[in-house]
Amino acid sequence: MNQFQGKTWYEFIIRNLWRYPNRLLALKAAIAMGSLLIPFVILNQSFIGVTLALGALAGALSETDDHPKGRIKALLLTIVSFAISSISVEILTPYPILFGVGLIGSTLSFIILGGLGERYRGVTFGALLVAIYTMLGASISPQWYIQPILLPAGALCYGLLSLSLLIFHPERLLEEQLAEGFEDLSLYMKEKAKLFPSDASVQKKTRNRLATLNIQLVNSLGRCKNVINSYADAIEDQNILRPYLHKFILLQSLHERAASSHEKYDLLSKNSDNVEILEGLGQLLIQLSQAAHELSKSLLMGTDYHHPVSIRWTISALRNQIKKKKSNSKHNDLGLLLKNLTQSHLSLQNMNYNLETGLLPRVDRDEESLWIRFSKQLNWNHPKFRYAIRLSTCFLIGYILIIAFKLEKGHWILLTSLFVCQPSYSETRRRLFQRILGTLSGVIAGVLIVQILPTKAGQIILLLTAAYAFFVWLKKNYSLSVVFVTIFVIAAFNLIADRGVAVMGPRVLDTLIGAILAIAVVRFMWPDWQYKKLPKLLAIAIAKNKEYFSRILLEYDQPSEDDLSYRISRYQAHQADNSLAMAWRGMKLEPKQHQKLQKRAFSLTYLNHALLSYLSALGAHRNTPNYMTEKEQGMYKDVEETLKIAANAIQNQTPCDSNENLQSILEKLDEILNETERGIRRQKLVLLYNIAEVTEQLVQKASLINKKDE
C-alpha cells in the first residue's frame, strides 16, 4: 500500500518539508539550481547552466532573515555586490599586481561591511564566494562578461523564488526563529533533567553539555530579537507582532526558569530521602521539554498547541509527596523548585490568554548608526578588523602561490581559506580538520558514485542531490556538508568538461594548502590567545551578573509592567557567561604553551555560571509577594555591592578586599539556617547563602587571575 495513501500532498509537504526549515532551504536551492541547470544542459550549454547554478548556490548562502521588504533590499544589495565582485575579477585577472591589490582591498572592505549587521554579513560573504567562483571559471568562460552576468542572475533567480514563498506566508521567518528557540529550550530542559538525581561523574558531563546548549539557546534568542526588529521596522501596525512578541517573552521567561538552580544538586542527590522526589522533578522537566518541542512543532506547522494534561498530574503527585515527607526532619523540602517548574507549566498552558490586552512588549534593539558601527571596527584591537587582515593575508599568499607555481585550479586554495579561516585559533583549527576530512571523504564517495552515474542525466541528479544534502547538513554537521559540496563539484566539472574526477587530485592538494595556510596565518599573525582575553571577559561577566542582580532586586522593590531593562540585563549576563565558557573551551584547542590559566579558567567559568544559575532562580521568583524580608534584602544588596567592587578591581587589575563582608554574611546566614525549620522559608535562605558563597569563591579566584602561576 502506498505510504502516502489517505494523506494529501499538502499534508505531506507540511509534515516533511515545511516543518523543517533546513529541508525547506535545501529544496528551494535545489529547485532554483535545477530550473537553471537542466534547460542549458539539454541545449549543450553546460557552462552557462552550471554557472547559473553556482550563482543560485551563493545566493542561498547569502540569504538574510528579513521581513519581505527588507529581503527585497538585501536581494538588490546581493545582486549589485555579486556583479561588482565578479566584474572586478574578470577585469583585473590579466594584471597580477593590480589583482593582488584589489584582492586585499575587496576582502578588507567586504569583511568590515559584514560587521555592520546580519543583513550585510551574509551578502558580503557571498560576494567573496562569487569572486572565487569567477576565478575558477575564468579560464573556461567564453567571454569576460559571461560570469558577471550569469552569477548574479543565478542569485536573482533563487532570491525571487525564496521571496515569493516568503510573500505567500510573510510571518514564516518569525515562526522559524521562535520554533528554533523553543526547540533549543526543549533540548536544554531534557539535558538538565539528568541532574535529578545524579552523581558527580554524571553532573560534570551534564554541565558541560548544558553549557553548550545554553550558548545555542542564547544565540537563538539573539536571532529571534533581530527578526522581530526587522519586522517591526517594516510594518506600521505593531499589533500584528503581538502574538510573536508574547511568545518571545515566554521563551525568555522559560529560559530563565530552566537555567535556574535553587540548591546544590550533588548534595541533594546524596540524601536518599530526596531521591524519589528528585526523580519526579526530573520526569517533570522531561515533560516540560516535550511540551516546548510540541510548541516548536506547532509554530512550524501552523497548528494549535495543545498543552499536555499529564504535566498537571505529575505536579499534583509531587505536591502530595512533598507534603507527606514534610514531617521528616532529614528531608529537604523541594517546594521552591517545584514552584518554579509549576510556573513554567502554567506559562505554557496559559500562553494564549489575554493576548490582546496590556502593553505591547518591547524588544531591545541596536540604536547605533551604521557609521558608528563601521568606525568602531576600524581599530587594530577590534576582532573583526584583525580577522579581515588575516583573511586578506591568506588570500594574498594563496594568490602568490598560484602565480609562482602555476597551479591548475589553484583558486581552490582561496576557497578553502575562506571557509577555514575563522576569527579565533580554536575555531580555525576545528574547521581545518572538518574541511580536510569532508573533502577527502567527498572525493572518495564522488569518484565511486560517478562510475555508477556516467550519463549527463546521472550527473544532473547527482549534482542536485548533493546540493540538497549540502544545505540540509550545513548547520548541523559541517564535515558532512563538505562531503556533499565536494560531490557537487565533481558533478559540475563532469557536466562542463567531463573532468570531474581528473580535477579531484588538484582539489585535494589545494584544500590541504588552503587549510594549512589558514591555520598558519591565525597561529602566527597577531594571535589572540584566550588566556590574554580571560581577565577582560571575567570582568565583563561579573559586571553583567552584578547588573542582572541589581535589576532583580529592583523588581522586588518596584515591580514594573514593562520589564525590558530587566530582560536586557538577563540576556547580557548570559552572553557574557557564554563568552567566558567559549574562551575556556577554545583554550583547550590552543597550543599547550598557550594554555595558561586553563585550570583557573575552568574554575572561574564554573563559578560564574553557578552564580548566574542562582541569580536566575532568584529572578524566577521576583513576582512572588513578600518573598524576602527587609533584613534579607539588605544582605542581598551587600552581596551585590561586593560583585560591583570585584568587577572594577579585575578590570583595573587592582586587589579586591571585599570578601570580609561576605564572610560575615555567610556566618550570619549559617546561624539563621541552623535555627530555621525545613520548608520554603529555609529554601529561600539556602538560595541566598548559595549566592553569597559562590560570590565569595568567585571573587577570591578572580583576585588571582593576573598571577602567572597555575
Image (spheres, grey):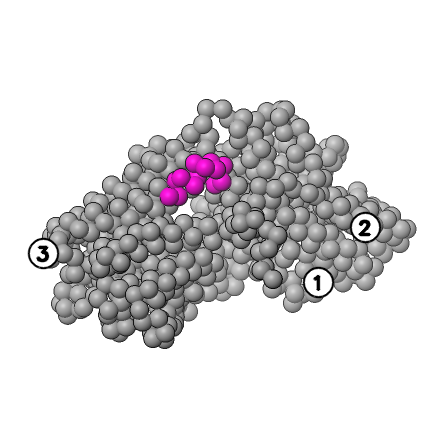
Q: Is residue 195 left or right of residue 642?
A: right
Amino acid type indicated by mark 1:
Ser
Q: Residue furthest front?
A: 1
x and y percent of residue 557 in the render? 66, 29
Magenta segment, principal secondary structure? Answer: helix
Mark 1 or mark 2, which is nearer the start of the sequence? 1
Q: Is residue 169 above or below residue 20?
A: above
Occupied quadrant, residue 121: top left
Task: Return the residue at label 3.
Answer: 94
Which residue does the image show at 68% across and 59% down from the upper left?
Answer: 195
- Numbered tag placed on residue 51 in the rendering: none
Please name whichever residue, 364 or 135, is drawn nearer the observer in this view of the structure: 135
Q: Name the residue: 36% across, 74% down.
A: 452
Residue 441 visible? The answer is yes
The three-letter amino acid code for the residue at tag 2 is Leu
Residue under numbered circle 1: 198
